[in-house]
Amino acid sequence: MKILLIQIEKTTDLYLIEGVKIYADRLKNYVQFSTETLVMPKSVRQKPVDEQKRAEAQEIQKLLEPSDYLVCMDEHGKQFTSVGFAEFLNKRMVSGCKRLVFLIGGPYGIDSSVLAKASTVLSLSEMTFSHQMVRLFFNEQLYRAFSILKNEKYHHE
């Protein structure tokens, strides 16, 4: 199984860039993991929020394949424990999923047209985090999930 993380706009804070890189490098031991960053033109960023989200949605759709299992990260989604998230990943792997795609939306969230195509909507917390911080939290949780599945000592219960 391959895992793709789609994110909107670049991560700009150096401490987040470094943290994301640490976990992305660790993930290479478990799965083929890649990240696709969509950078929207400044002209789009000057439009109303709904138009920005629609423009992002159009670019996201270009990256998706019909057989993808799409997971949208949204504060109103389903929450898992770390062990539950590991079980979720394991189910995707044993089901023959070829590509699992996680989407972290931009600063205003994910357009409803993309949310409607998601197989799962996932929330990391009831709290709101910046979309840049979610990248670090997500990468760490993805690494933690694989370490749980491999019975490694990273996760403590």
Image (spheres, grey):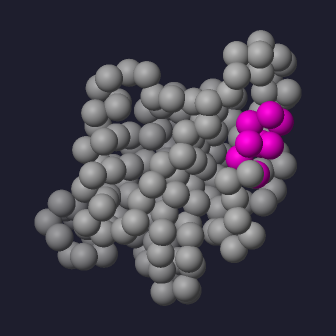
Q: In this rendering, would 84 be left or right of 73?
A: left
- In the rendered image of this protein, does residue 142 appear above or below residue 152? above
User: Is residue 81 shown to the viewer in this render?
Assistant: no
- In the rendered image of this protein, does residue 131 appear above or below residue 145? above
In the image, residue 119 lies in the stretch drawn in magenta: no
The residue sitting at 81% across, 56% down in the picture is: 116
Q: Position of residue 92 (x, y in %)?
A: 53, 77
Q: Position of residue 45 (x, y in %)?
A: 73, 18
Q: Quadrant of residue 40?
A: top right
Q: Quadrant of the C terminus?
A: bottom left
> From which residue to which does the magenta span run?
54-61
Examine the residues drawn in magenta and state their main secondary structure: helix
Q: In this rendering, would 6 be left or right of 19?
A: right
Q: Nearer the viewer, residue 72 or 124?
A: 72
Q: Position of residue 65 (x, y in %)?
A: 70, 65
Number of marks present in the image shown: 0
User: Is residue 99 shown to the viewer in this render?
Assistant: yes
Q: Position of residue 100 (x, y in %)?
A: 56, 66
In the image, residue 60 lies in the stretch drawn in magenta: yes
Q: Residue extending furthest left?
A: 153
The residue sitting at 43% across, 22% down in the picture is: 12
The residue sitting at 51% across, 29% down in the picture is: 10
- In the rendered image of this protein, does residue 66 appear above or below residue 46? below
- In the rendered image of this protein, does residue 14 appear above or below residue 152? above
